[in-house]
Image (cartoon, rainbow, N blue to C red):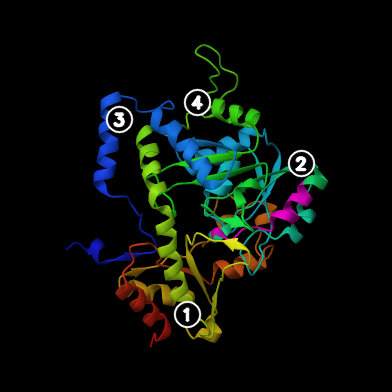
Amino acid sequence: MSEDTKRTYVTQPALPPLDEFVESLKIIWGNRILTNKGPFHKQFEQELADYLGVKYISLTANGTLALVTALQALRITGEVITTPYSFVASTHSLWWNNIKPVFVDIEPDTCNLDPEKIEAAITPQTTAILPVHVYGNPCNVHQIREIGEIYGLKVIYDACHTFGVTINNEPVLNFGDLSVMSFHATKTFTTFEGGAIVCHDEAMKKRIDFLINFGFAGETTVVAPGINSKMNEIQAAMGLLQLKHIDSYIEKRRRIASLYRERLNGIPGLRLLYDMPGVKHCYPYFPVFVDEEKYGMSRDALYEKLKQNNIYGRRYFYPLISQFPTYRGLESAQPGKMPRAEKTSGQVICLPVYPELNEDTLVKTITIIKDFE
């Protein structure tokens, strides 16, 4: 057994039965259509929209290209207000579009962009807000929408953690001008790599589809300087199979999260996130926040202790995006500007949560956290 097979990582992709996928591959081999909106692509796009409860969706090769393309689709320029507490792709997509990110602090309870901090960051150059539904917990979508309407700002949600998430039965993807998804191997729903852009009208759907295919609007007509960010047929075939199993995947994740909460609740110095009222969650990560003084061990010491036992948690999100060399020269990224995000980043560790996580490993993880001496 290799060393890697002994290790438990924070996530592991859930996959459909191999024989189901092989049957899809046989079809692809038979029709020789690999990309450019083949039959699997078209079918997956429709079935995914139906499952998620959205009107229009455009499939992409990955979530980062979806973010880059979404900003192009809305012709965003100047400055965009966003969060430092996310994966770097959120802000990299701005940088690749020559847009200046403006960071604001987060809410302590949800780890999401704090709407109360947005207005003070708006300047004449601000054109949009790019919030992230962190750990699948929806942002304050109503307050953010109101701010966007008052100041004439577009709202693009990084919804990469929110597969199937709803607020009072309304898909979270239906908020904002656009929402962007990721189907990376670490996500609740995966197509190996993959992503999507959700929009609300046919005209925008058409523009996005032009942009993800080099800007082609016909065989000889290019209407925009697009990019090649199309999803291929193998990814789409995988996506169709995953839709058949996703509800069971999410239920298994929910059970694991419930057990963590039951066993770790009330431990001094540990803060957990709980399901939000009226929200249907998808449990992409299980973060725990460590207060060293009250817990008796630092987050990093706990991280190393788990590693010594072959349990590889992740410090999502540490460091903050604003602390990376590319961005730390920005005025909004200066130390002390975002005390909540800085504190949270220094305390968070995400524990293993995925459908095939076995009970022995789960109990082992909990035991190490409860009795680390």
Q: CA distance from mark 2 to mark 3?
A: 48 Å
> Disc 3 designates what residue?
28
Residue ID for mark 2: 125
Q: Label 4: which residue? A: 213
Looking at the rendering, the stretch of residues picked out in magenta corresponds to 136-148
Real-space Cα separation, disc 1 to disc 2, in angstroms: 47 Å
Left or right, residue 76 beside residue 366: right
Q: On the picture, is 135 further left or further right than 202? A: left
State the image coordinates of residue 346 (x, y, percent, origin top left).
54, 70
Q: Position of residue 53 (x, y in %)?
A: 57, 45
Question: What's the CA distance linking mark 4 and mark 3?
Answer: 21 Å
Q: Quadrant of residue 366?
A: bottom left
> Who comes first in sequence, dot 2 or dot 3?
3
Q: Which-is-in-front pick, marks 1 and 2?
A: 1
Q: Label 3 vs label 1: CA separation?
A: 46 Å
Answer whether labels 4 and 3 touch (C-beta < 8 Å).
no
Question: In which quadrant will I find the N terminus?
Answer: bottom left
Q: Amino acid at mark 4?
A: Asn
SS assignment at label 4: loop
Label 3 Cα crowd, 10 Å radius (few <14 / some 14-19 / many 20+): some
